[in-house]
Image (cartoon, grey):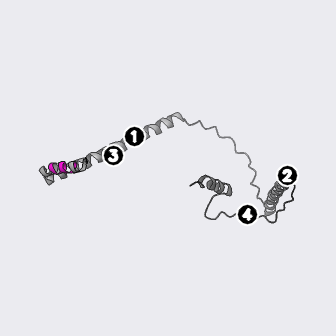
Amino acid sequence: MSFLPIALMEGEKITGTMGGNTIAAITIIGLAVVFAGLLILILYLYLSGAVFRRSNSADHKPEPTPKARPAAQVAPVKQVSKSAAAEDESEVVAAIMAAIAAMGAADGKTYRVRSVKPVHRGSMGRSAWAQAGLSDNTTPF
């Protein structure tokens, strides 16, 4: 036996005895109760957040600042020349080549580096390692 036709008939009996003003008043009162509940909830969350912020700031008392020392002579920042940057790049390439040579020695093969180019990430913004991890984690999906 289905309860839907019975519920519809009972609903017609109830709404048939009510006027349009009564139905509108019940709807408006229901909406007012819901919005009042939401406002109370917002107020509660705002106040509890203020209490927690205040308790966190009380736990972290600022440390007293040390007395000012006489200013010491600061050495000027040394500018890195392009030759130093090139030396750093050549050291990186040498380290990569040494790792490849060690890998080749373990395999009994000889590997060779043909070129070294910087990787341009473009719009992705992720490193190759981050992209590989993302690919591994989302492959099943």
Disc on res. 118: 4
Question: What element does badge 3 sit on?
Answer: helix
* Nearest to N terminus: mark 2 or mark 3: 3
Residue bounds of the magenta highlight: 7-13
User: Mark 2 or mark 4, which is nearer the start of the sequence?
Assistant: 2
Hey, what amino acid is under mark 4? Answer: Pro
> In which image quadrant can residue 94 be found?
bottom right
Answer with mark 4 or mark 1, whichever residue precedes in sequence.
1
Label 2 CA crowd tier, 10 Å (few <14, some 14–19, many 20+): few
Q: Main secondary structure of the magenta part?
A: helix
- Is there a contact, CB below 8 Å, between mark 1 and mark 2? no
How many numbered marks appear? 4
Q: Earlier in the sequence, mark 3 or mark 1?
A: 3
| Label 3: few (<14), some (14–19) or many (≥20) C-alpha neighbours in 10 Å | few
Horizontal side of 76 relative to 127 (left or right) equals: right
- Quadrant location, the C terminus: bottom right
Residue drawn at 73 percent across, 45 percent down: 72
Question: First in sequence: mark 3 or mark 4?
Answer: 3
Q: Position of residue 13 (x, y in %)?
A: 15, 49
The kind of residue tagged 1 is Leu
- Residue 44 visible, this orientation: yes
Q: Which residue is mark 1?
A: 47
Name the residue nearer the viewer: 52 or 11.
11
Q: Amino acid at mark 3?
A: Leu
Q: Nearer the viewer, mark 1 or mark 2?
A: 2
The x and y percentages for residue 58 are 50, 34
Disc 4 or disc 2, which is closer to the eye?
A: 2
Circle on res. 106: 2
What amino acid is found at the position of numbered circle 2 in the picture? Ala
Tell me the distance, in whole angstroms, between the alpha carbons under discs 3 and 1: 14 Å
